[in-house]
Structures are given as structure tokens and as C-alpha cells.
Amino acid sequence: MERGPADVFVPAGEVQLRVGVLGTYDMEAGSWLWGWANPGLGGSEVVALSAAVARYGQAHGIPELTAEEIDLSGFDDPRRAAEMLAFAGMGVANTPGYIGQPAGPGTQVYFLPDDPKVPSAQLDPVALPRVLMTGASLIGYAPRQAVMGYFERHGVPQRVEGDRLIADLPTGNAAVVSFDRIGRIGDIQLTVSG
């Protein structure tokens, strides 16, 4: 396979993996620069996934996804804000994860896997409670939307019944997620059919 600008070699596992540049976080300035806006990369194949994030932002009116550079210095934890942008970019680009790597003193570059060798995570009923709780805590607000988005991403039919969201899992079982009166996840139960 011919190496292109988006191929990364990881010596520890000796794995060659095709990735795209999502963006960079400048720790000193506390700023995020989207890959598509990087003057040295703009318009190239290596930022195609990043450009897809910008198109999504334009279509849905999300300025954080369309501004070339974002000042994160006003956040209590600018590094966490950068991670949230990477997390959002991963979701919008529908990739199975993101990779953050130091790119020099004070700079972190974020990549998105763009390689069929990287499998997408499948919904695992055993891990589901942990995944939902972790995802909701990472987002930090709107747990109901985070849970609904997770099931939508996996193509799982769901319905709302009062303070509960019921998802019909591919296994034939159901996940019942209850929310308390202020919208937090209160309980997650897996029902077994048959």
C-alpha cells in the first residue's frame, strides 16, 4: 500500500492506519483549529472528514463546527473542551473513535480513523449501562438526549413512556432507562424476553 499524507505508522503495534486530521488544540493559546481550516492542509484529502463536520455544522447552524478557530480559554478546563470538540467531530463524521497525539510542545493533534480495518463498536447489552452512564457524563448535560442519540446511532428503535425510555435491542431484549425529575439517568434495566 502506498503511503499518503493521511497514513500513520504506530511502532508499538506496528500497525499502519489511515486517518484524517480533525483538528489541533494549542494549549498555550487555549484554541482549537479545525483541520479543514489549517492553511497547510485545507482542501486536501487528509481533512475530508473534518470538512464533513463543517458541512454538518453549516446545515444545522452549529457555529462551533463552522468557525475556523475556536477560543477555548474561557472554559474552566480548555483541554476538556477540546476533547468535547473531538468527541463531537467523531460522532458527526460517524467514525469509530478519535486519536489525540502530541504534535510538539503545547500542541495536540486529533485524528479520526478513516480505515476499514478499524471496526465500529457494536452495541453490547452487557456493557450498555456503563456505556450510557459514561456517555452521559462525558456530554455533561442533557442525559436523555445522549441516551436517545446513542440508540439512534445504533439504529435501535425506542419509545418514551413517561420518565422512561425503552429501547428494543437487536437481541430481542429491551433496555429501560429511567430519568429522575431533573433529567439525570436514575436507573438502567435490561429485560430478557422469552
Image (cartoon, rainbow, N blue to C red):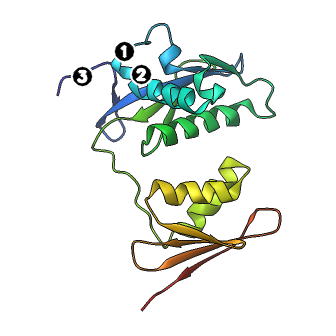
Quadrant location of the C terminus in the rendered image:
bottom left
Pick out the residue farthest to the left: 1
Q: Quadrant of residue 166?
A: bottom right
Residue at image mark 1:
44
Relative horizontal placement of residue 101, taking residue 106 as reference (left or right): left
Pick out the residue farthest to the top: 39
Q: Amino acid at mark 1?
A: Ser
- Residue at x 46%, y 43% (from the top left corner): 97
Q: Quadrant of residue 94?
A: top left
Q: Of marks 1 and 3, which one's residue comes earlier in the chain?
A: 3
Give 69 or 26, whichever is nearer the viewer.
69
Residue 149, percent across and down? 56, 54
Q: Of marks 3 and 2, which one's residue comes earlier in the chain?
A: 3
Give the vertical position of 27 relative to 157 (above or below): above
Tags 1 and 2 in contact by the CB under 8 Å rule?
Answer: yes
Pick out the residue farthest to the bottom: 194
Residue 82, percent across and down? 64, 31
Give 74 or 103, whichever is nearer the viewer.
74
Give the vertical position of 68 relative to 112 (above or below): above
Residue at image mark 3:
3
Quadrant location of the N terminus in the rendered image:
top left
Residue at image mark 2:
47
Q: Amino acid at mark 3?
A: Arg
**SS at mark 3?**
loop
Cα–Cα gap, marks 1 and 3? 15 Å
Residue 41, percent across and down? 43, 12
- Residue at x 45%, y 67% (from the top left corner): 124
Q: Amino acid at mark 2?
A: Val
Cα–Cα gap, marks 3 and 2? 16 Å
- Residue at x 56%, y 61% (from the top left corner): 131
